[in-house]
Amino acid sequence: MLKRIKFALCILLLSFSSITQKQSEPWVKFGLTDEEAARHVLDRFAFGPRQGDIEKVASVGVSNWFENQMLAAKDNSQLEEILSKLNFKSLEMSLEEMVNTYVPYGQINRRVKDWAVESGLVTEQDFLTMTNEEQRRLALLYMDDFSLRPISELDSETLAQKMIRAAYSENQFQEVLTDFWFNHFNIDASQNDVRPYVYSYERDAIRSNVFGNFSDMLEATAKHPGMLFYLDNGLSTAGSDVETTVSFHMENLSQTTRKRDLPKSARSLLNNSGRGLNENYARELMELHTLGVDAFNNIDGYTQKDVQEVARAFTGWTWFLQDSLNTRLPEGISPMGMANQDSNMSAMDIQVGNSFLSSQLERLGFVQEGSFIFRASAHDAGEKNILGHYFPRGGGLEEGEKVLNILSRHEYTARFLSRKIAIKFVQDNPPEELVELMAKAYLDNSGDLSEVYRSMFYSDYFWRDEAIRSKIKSPFELIISTVRILDSKVTSLKGLFNSIKTMGQPLYRYQAPTGYPDSASSWVNTGSLISRMNFGLLIGGDKIRGVDSDLKALNTFDGVFHEPESVQHALEVYAGIIMPYRDLKETLRILEPVVNAEDLNVKIEIASEQFNVERSMRTEMSDDDFSNVLDQNFEIGTNRKTTKENEGILGQIVGVILGSPEFQRR
Amino acid sequence: MHDDHDDDIKGIWTRRAFLKSGGIALFSLGVGGNPLFINRAAINSKNNLLNQNKTLVTIFQRGAMDGLMAVPKLNDKYLMNARPRLYMNPGSKNDPVLDLDNGFAFHPSLMPLMDYWKEGSLSVVHGMGSPNKTRSHFDAQDFMESGTPGDKGTDSGWLNRAVGLMGHESPTPFQSVALTPSLPKSFYGEESALAISDLDNFGLPSYINIGNIVGNTFESLYEDTTKEILKDTADATFEAVDLLEKIRQKDYVATSQVSYPNSKLGNSLRQIAQLIKADVGLEVAFAEQGGWDTHVQQGTAQGSFANNLRDLSESISSFWEDLGPYQDRVNLMTMTEFGRTVKENGTGGTDHGRGSCLFVLGQDVDGQKVHGHVPTLAKENLEDGRDLPVTTDFRAIFSEVVGSTFGIANDEELFPGWKGERIKLFKS
């Protein structure tokens, strides 16, 4: 009898543990092997596998790998080595340091002239007759003297570090999410006033928050100059006839805090010299960042009135430049968010301890957080009604913060974000049930994004047949996944960047706050297919500047290259190397006639040019030329001897594989 | 309208004529039967279509066939010592090679070709290869197909040049046909040629449209796009498709009564036979067969090499049977880019070598002979001390074969840069 009980208990325990195993390995019920599951997660949560990655992830355990990725704590020595070799100066700089170091030529031209003349380098006369090139060189000397650097260098370093991290970081999920959330909270670097802040925005507001709470990321973007400039909120102020926080507080303060007791320079802070309300940020905040457009004029959603009220709540949110170089520059660089007459302010006068604000200003409602400043004098302190919440008169910074809070916790937000995340990681048309369960995870965990990702990963929907291979790579994803699977040696990033741009995705430069679209229909059409085929052929043939791929090495074992016996055989072998654990029968069938076609390279190139001629390309990257950073001679990737023999049939075969429909899928 | 018979030596088959554009002028006779119909439109009297035009069928064995295992030299102790596992003795119980009574033998898989050997229509050329010493498959195949060893810049293939040197215009788009998914390098050049991977599906869309863009539609978008970009001369292909459809409708492409191996090569030769017997004006045909790169576990009388060789010989013999009375109009030649080492390697196979052998089959062939030269395989006789030396340049063979088949004499244009002499392989 006891035996039977023990036996039954054993069975019970076994089935219980197998249940838990099934829960932690949801792909098993769909017939996926561990390798196929690994393949899928590397396609979605990483920028594609490198050689050997699939096996590694399978052996570590796919769920284990996923959980580890969310800790973003993997040993990243390869990436760090690359970055330290590159010696990018901006990488570790604080935002203030960046702002004080990188300057656009336009802003310093006058000073360059004065300085050059003063130091006896040129005469006034000479300066007027100098060519642009000569003026530029003079400007560089000036910058050198004052430890300044051209802003194009910051721009280039930003682009470079994005590509390098995507290709080489071991914390792949973090990089994929940084790309995703930047796109969600999109800002456009081609705007001159936004450009200086893009790198810090991505690093400080986005990347550090992708596994945390959504409300933290939301607040970080709301207070970052990148967003404040891009959506104009930094310039949004209360109307001139409206009661501000300052005037509200002034009523209640004693005589001793009257205007005349403040330092002269601080007095100008008290003026509301703003231009009035700007609704741009308020609208996009709700439509694009949180509630989503479906909530507009919908039950429990938001209305145009809400947009206005929210805009009022965010007045005064702006950015004050702490320019410690003020003493060296005759005119202070104009702090943003302030009207012209404030530009003569010297930060030195106001600096008290760590905060530049005196306690008097603080009592008047001013708040400073790092380089963010709440200008109480520009804030509309009237009462407000926002999304059903009442805000009494006399509010300050906390009003906008409360709005962000309301939005973060909103049900519409939970669904809107969940849907976007599901589209990115599962399929273009995610089932409602999936969106619901992710939204529930969001709300149950107060906006903890890791829980949302988790709920998606452990659901059946992520592993079903219709989810696998159902997404199309963006040009950025295509290029990074190519460099990873080929283990290419990268010595310069300009060629790659230009390829991404040609395929329609100039990085950091999507004009609208909606960010790049994320569905197959946006990336799959004849023109983009041809440019992807062209890219494949170029990179296979080592024709992209700065990228070399040792194709023979991919099929070399124990030092011996196993040359395929024919073009047909090479196609099979290399398709398997470049797209492991995929069913390639159909792919091989359609690639066969292409791979051996006469004059393939030329024909694709011609077709590609025909399609790209009309494409509106953003050719001017910035008012400055591209600095040398992207052309720098650095080496990434194992130092192998690459032979020129790749140019030729093997390069063409690999090129055709990279341009195949199957390789576009992730 | 009147019947037009053109009896040839063997009997009762008529020449047929096609016109390139407009309708088909087609008249045919079945074997031993009556004329089905005769419908002749205006024919360009200048072209010599009504002459007996021959067909050359070439088979490219990709991967470098081990000539010393296909046609081993007998009684050579060096070969025996170099191949402890791979050597096969004639008359031995386990590895019965077929003694040819001339110092050579056939690998047992070549049994299906023995009749042709005995009747004198099959010959071997041994020690054949390229003067260029590359051991890269891609490069060597490239050089053999372009016919300019050492020169990668040639943009035409040797068969294309041969067609150009034939001295007549072809009225049909089926003059040069490769049974491959895309045109082989041998066919690159000014003369138009067709690549047909499957006669039955030639010209038909090979996909079905499904709505979901990341379903099959992406593949079909890709196929449409590439077809559009890569089309050679749309006209030739369109005409060919059109003609083929008409031929199919009239049921002139008879199904073979012979059974072929169910392999890629078997299928290719089967379809070539169909085209030949349908008299569509086929003059040069190309097929290929892979699997010859036997670095590992080559096997002897059994194994991967044996199976591949059997596929070759059975496909050829089925083809030859199928041709029946058309045999006198066809020459068949095999080729491979280089041979393999005399010495076997550590994994039961052989590595890349130099000289190999090829087969030539035809009524007019100086058959039952091993042409070319294979020295005693002592190390000092081997190229680089390891390989069967190349004693016959492949161009000497190819030029002789197209010379006999098509009457081509201009070797300078056929093989630019070659100053050699043809090797005599035919009786007449």
Image (spheres, coloured by chain):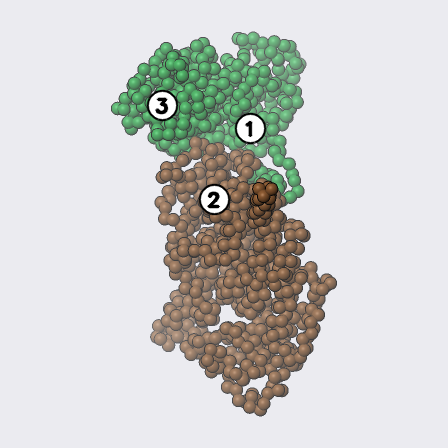
**Label 1's element?**
loop
What is the three-letter code of the residue carrying label 1?
Ile
Q: Residues within 10 Å of mark 1 (few under 14, many from 20)?
A: many
* Rendered location of residue A255, percent (x, y): 58, 91
* Rendered location of residue B144, percent (x, y): 41, 28
Task: Name which quarter of the figure residue A439 lies in.
Answer: bottom right
* Chain given the colour green: B
Residue drawn at x 44%, y 37% is: A649
What is the three-letter code of the residue carrying label 3?
Arg
Residue bearing mark 3? B85
Q: Does label 1 lie on the same chain as label 2?
A: no
Name the quadrant of the N terminus of chain A: top right
Residue A516 appears in the picture as rendered = no
Q: Residues within 10 Å of mark 2 (few under 14, many from 20)?
A: some
Residue bearing mark 1? B196
Residue drawn at x 60%, y 86% is: A250
* Closer to us: A407 or A58: A58
For the residues bearing labels 3 and 1, Cβ distance under 8 angstroms: no
**Label 3's element?**
loop
* Closer to us: B387 or A445: A445
Q: Does label 1 lie on the same chain as label 3?
A: yes
Residue drawn at x 34%, y 23% is: B83
In three-dimensional space, the C-alpha distance between marks 2 and 1, rounded to whole angstroms, equals 40 Å
What is the three-letter code of the residue carrying label 2?
Glu
Q: Is residue A559 left or right of residue A381?
A: left
Chain letter for mark 3:
B
Q: Residues within 10 Å of mark 3 (few under 14, many from 20)?
A: some
Q: Which one is in front in this view, the residue at disc 2 or the one at disc 1? A: 2
* Rendered location of residue B388, percent (x, y): 33, 24
Chain letter for mark 1:
B
Residue B387 appears in the picture as rendered = yes
